[in-house]
């Protein structure tokens, strides 16, 4: 190993090392009980490594054969990374971790996220990507007491291409199962607010109910009050030439707030409900024969008189 002192100054090097070409020759080597080689920089890197290897050689390489870390990075800066990797090519990795039996890359944090990924890609790139080349799992999330995987998105919180298997309970925080329908292009569709009772017209599009005991009853427009749909089926664009220019999510199963009219008959908890002549409203079904095929559901809250909102357990029949 040859060592030469160099004149200090701008862009100069205090110590350089040059070794004759060989498979394992070393330009500069250091050994110490504490630190073998130490570098300090006032304005730039403390240690810089550069490699022109074409067979996978590294600019900086760290190894530990006694159980410690091969490379350690530490910083006290608030937003400065302890280890930083940058890739300037078209494809590659800024940081790559590889292991035979352990984790290729691991992150730990006491007060924030263990691993953080961010992407500014406009062509589908992801902040974090997990891939398994065999039959294993691409990405796993686990929490001893909290949430294993948490997702939030501007358009979708999650997108699954393929089958989805759930071995535990599927907890949905909404109040009903809804399905989208086309809305009829009519003047009275202004009555199609959340909570409105709707029926199907001759083309299968939605319109607010206007007749008592209408057997074309389809459900209730979901989303009134503190209830939102837990599941919405058949989300898509309106069909051309069928209905109007929009679709509504209609509660067909579950609990939903509904506009009701108790002017002629008080609504009690447990009463069967049907369509009313008041547009978009339900009423108590007192004529059981007429109610056959026109039942909207059962009342879960009462309404003594006038118009108002009742909570309905939707069950068409």
Image (cartoon, rainbow, N blue to C red):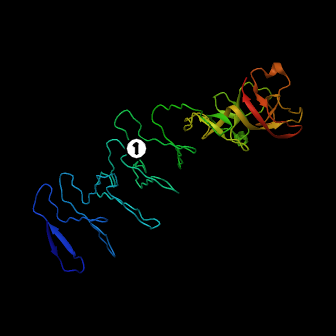
Of 74 and 258, the residue lying toward us: 74
Residue 91 position in % (x across, y down): 30, 51
Q: Position of residue 181 (x, y in %)?
A: 62, 34
Q: From this viewpoint, is residue 184 visible? A: no
Q: Residues within 10 Å of mark 1 (few under 14, many from 20)?
A: few
Residue 85 falls in image quadrant: bottom left
* Residue 162 vertical placement versus 109 (above, below): above
- Considering the numbered disc 1 on the image, is that residue within a helix, a strand or a loop? loop
Along the line of sight, the residue nearer the viewer: 166 or 216: 166
Answer whether residue 231 is visible to the viewer in this image.
yes
Q: Residue at x 17, y 68 (%)?
A: 17
Q: Is residue 314 left or right of residue 68?
A: right
Instruction: Name the residue beneath numbered marker 1.
Output: 130
- Total marks in image: 1
Q: Position of residue 172 (x, y in %)?
A: 63, 37
Which residue does the image show at 38% across and 41% down from the upper left?
131
Q: Position of residue 212 (x, y in %)?
A: 80, 28
User: Which residue sits furthest front?
Assistant: 33
Please tell me in which quadrant of the rendered image residue 20 appears: bottom left
Horizontal side of 242 relative to 57 (left or right) equals right
* Quadrant for the C terminus in the image: top right
Horizontal side, residue 167 vs residue 178: left or right: left
Q: Which residue is at 17% across, 54% downward?
A: 54
Which of the image's four quarters has the N terminus?
bottom left
Q: Please name whichever residue, 214 or 118, is drawn nearer the observer in this view of the structure.
A: 118
Closer-to-camera residue (106/311): 106
């Amino acid at each position: 190993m040859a060592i030469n002192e160099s004149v200090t100054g701008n862009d100069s090097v205090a110590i350089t090392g040059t070794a004759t070409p060989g498979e394992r020759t070393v330009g500069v080597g250091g050994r110490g009980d504490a630190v073998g080689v130490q570098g300090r920089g006032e304005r730039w890197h403390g240690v810089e490594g550069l490699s022109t290897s074409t067979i996978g050689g590294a600019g900086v390489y760290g190894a530990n054969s006694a159980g410690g870390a091969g490379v350690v990075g530490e910083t006290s800066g608030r937003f400065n990374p302890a280890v930083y990797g940058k890739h300037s090519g078209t494809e590659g990795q800024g940081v790559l971790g590889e292991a035979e039996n352990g984790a290729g890359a691991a992150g730990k944090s006491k007060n924030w996220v263990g691993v953080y990924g961010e992407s500014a890609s406009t062509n589908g790139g992801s902040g974090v990507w997990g891939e398994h080349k065999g039959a294993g799992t691409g990405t796993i999330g686990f929490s001893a007491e909290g949430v294993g995987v948490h997702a939030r998105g501007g358009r979708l919180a999650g997108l699954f291409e393929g089958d989805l298997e759930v071995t535990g309970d599927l907890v949905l925080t909404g109040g009903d199962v809804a399905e989208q329908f086309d809305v009829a292009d009519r003047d009275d569709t202004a009555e199609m607010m959340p909570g409105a009772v709707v029926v199907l017209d001759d083309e299968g599009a939605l319109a607010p109910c206007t007749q008592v005991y209408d057997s074309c009853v389809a459900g209730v427009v979901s989303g009134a009050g503190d209830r939102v749909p837990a599941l919405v089926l058949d989300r898509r664009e309106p069909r051309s030439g069928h209905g109007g220019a929009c679709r509504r999510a209609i509660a067909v199963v579950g609990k939903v707030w509904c506009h009701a009219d108790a002017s002629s008959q008080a609504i009690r908890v447990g009463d069967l409900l049907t369509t009313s002549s008041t547009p978009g409203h339900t009423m108590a079904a007192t004529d059981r024969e007429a109610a056959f095929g026109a039942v909207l559901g059962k009342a879960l809250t009462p309404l003594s008189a006038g118009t108002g909102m009742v909570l309905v357990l939707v069950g068409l029949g």
